[in-house]
Image: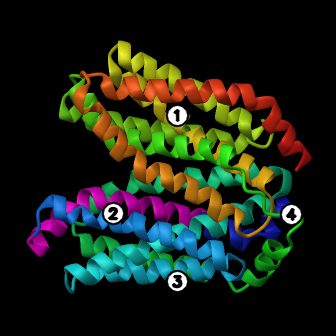
Amino acid sequence: MASLIRTHAALLVAGILTFAIMGAGQSLYGPALPAFAREFGLTVAQAGWLVSALWIGSASGVALMFFRGRHVTPRHALGVMVLGAGGVASGIGWWPTLAGSVVFGMGYGISTVVFNPRVLRAFGAKGPSMVSLLNAMFAVGAILAPLGFVAIGSNPQLAFAAVAVICALIWLVAGTDGRAEETVAAAVSKPYRFRAGLLCFGVVCIGVEACLIGLGPTALITAGASEETAARALSGFFVAFLIARSALVFVAHLVPAFGIYAFAMCGAAACAIGAALFPAVPFFIGMGAFAGLFFPGFFVTASRIMGDDPRVTPTIIAAGLVGGISSPVILGWLVGGMGDRGFFQIVAGVTLVTAFISLLLLRRYNAEVLRG
């Protein structure tokens, strides 16, 4: 393992730092939106288009990687993030800021597709653990960035300027050996195998994760919690999320990937049922731990089964984006006519059905991963 780390040090360090700054950048949008709204004379709802722009850019980056991924290196991804964060930080007008958010999101999508499969391949049997490490660092950045935002006087331009500078520094760390990683990515040993049924598990898990993060605090308030309690519960959710992903670093290479997914979905279902029947806050926090296991379990399973073709990872990430973008809208509409625990009842139903199906298919998918 030590020799692998030395051989791929530039890739691993750049990946860890990039995922941390991705988490930081995304979490900055929440506290920065009111400041942007004041600066550009917008309502907070109008300023919220910055968040939509981030996700539109991310989807565009993933689509680009589907067609051109073989030729894109970590430095390309970081360069796009520098340009995007710089555009948001420029403060020269609403439309340039919105465009900067789209470009920054594009860097997100490209980085996700660039780093996850390369790290998975580079570290062999320990690849799943290293992928878990990358994704754990995303949570670290998401937790720390709002604190830093307050420390610099809640200045959004300064915050995104700092993100741009850090991305530029990571660009230097990434080095010039991207060609070696590109060669690995180009060496296709398993053809592209599109698996619609398997991808549905990604749609569901990322959709549930997005709903918990985006709608969970409001659902807690509807269920009787105060706004302060709901905010603290979201922080607790992310702490549990981080702890779970950090634990995977030590065990992900020892446990079948789809087994991790099935276990996580079962745990999330149990917590959602608890939140629907009992005081919701502790169960919501508990769901953070299981949500932290969703993506690593799904990504490793799908990568092993669907092949090494450069189009595989963009397809996997696109499935997650479908769930992440559509699920909060659908769930927000569904809970409108339900009671104060409607959100948790729907989440419980979705996770319980998914857990049941994943357990039925557990042996089949584990066998396919081994054959792959």
| Amino acid at the residue labelled 1 | Ala
Task: Name the image quarter holding residue 253.
Answer: top right
- At x 58%, y 30%, the residue is 354
- What residue is at 80 percent from the left and 68 percent from the top? 6
Q: Report which residue position mark 4 lands on.
A: 3
Sequence-first tag of 1 and 3: 3
Is the magenta region chiefly helix, strand or loop?
Answer: helix
**Position of 271 relative to 33 (above/below):** above
Marks 3 and 4, the one that precedes in the sequence: 4
Distance of label 1 from label 2 (alpha carbons): 26 Å
Residue at point 25% right, 36% down? 218
Viewer-nearest of discs 1 and 2: 2
* Residue underneath mark 2: 52
Residue 1 visible in the shown view: no
Secondary structure, mark 4, is: helix
- How far is disc 4 from disc 2 in space, using C-alphas? 42 Å
Dot 1 or dot 4, earlier in sequence = 4
Looking at the rendered structure, the secondary structure element under dot 2 is helix
Q: Nearer the viewer, mark 4 or mark 2?
A: 2
Residue type beneath disc 2? Ser
The span shown in magenta is: 16-41
Q: Which mark is residue 79?
A: 3
Residue bearing the label numbered 1: 289
Give coordinates of residue 350: x percent, y percent: 49, 29
Residue in the foreground of this view, choosing between 289 and 336? 336
Is 284 positioned to the left or the right of 10 in the image? left
